[in-house]
Amino acid sequence: MTLLIDANILLDVLMDRQPFTKSSSLVWKLCETGLVRGYVSVLSFADIVYIMRKSLSPDKTESLLRSLAQIFLFADLRFKDLQKAAGMRWGDYEDAVQVTAAKAVAADYIVTRNLKDYKQSPVPAILPEQLCAMF
């Protein structure tokens, strides 16, 4: 199974955002053990660094990238991916970019806590708890 992991799932773990940490940690574990292929878009990594910027020095940013790359695969974005996302004409461009990344890696699901943001998505969005129930 191939997944695109939304930034909010990673942030739940990195920032210990309760009560979401437990279910999001289980998603990490599924990726870490190889039971699923978990992708993170490069856009999500940039978003994470921006959100955590007050606690991340350049050295910590580099270390975080290396650590995440041991668990997750990164979905690169090209200009044509950004054009596709713009052509989707969604209210939230960032979500459209995530869908484009999910399609590019042939993801079965987008794992997120924001299901409402992905109602129009051709790649189904599921909650971490829904993914964990499959295992």
Image: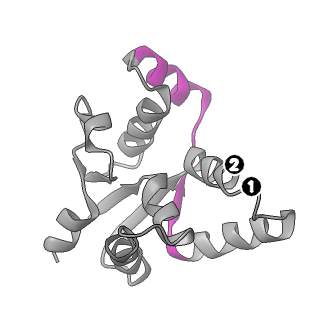
Near-viewer residue (6 or 16): 16
Q: Which residues are magenta?
A: 71-87
Residue with the mark numbered 1: 53
Secondary structure found at label 1: loop
In which quadrant of the rendered view does residue 3 lie? bottom left
Q: Quadrant of the N terminus?
A: bottom left
80 sits left or right of 125 in the view: right
Circles 1 and 2, Cβ within 8 Å, touching? The answer is yes
Dot 2 corresponds to which residue?
50
Task: Please name the amino acid that badge 2 sits on.
Answer: Tyr
The amino acid pointed to by label 1 is: Arg
Q: Is residue 86 above or below residue 37?
A: above
User: Does the magenta segment cover residue 86?
Assistant: yes
Residue at point 74%, 73% (across, down): 63
**In magenta stretch: residue 77:** yes
The residue positioned 54% from the left and 26% from the top of the image is: 82
Q: Classify the position of the C terminus by image quarter.
A: bottom left
Colour scheme employed for the rendering of this structure: one colour
Say which residue appears at 35% left-offset and 77% top-offset: 22
Label 2 environment density (alpha carbons within 10 Å; few <14, some 14–19, many ≥20): few
Seen as rendered, the residue at the extreme left is: 134
- Residue 109, given in percent of the width and then of the height, sits at 26, 52
Total labels: the figure holds 2
Label 2: which secondary element: helix
Which label is found at residue 134?
none
* 14 on left or right of 114: right
Residue 38, image quadrant: bottom left
Give the percent coordinates (x, y) of residue 115. Answer: 26, 44
Q: Residue at x 44, y 26 (%)?
A: 92
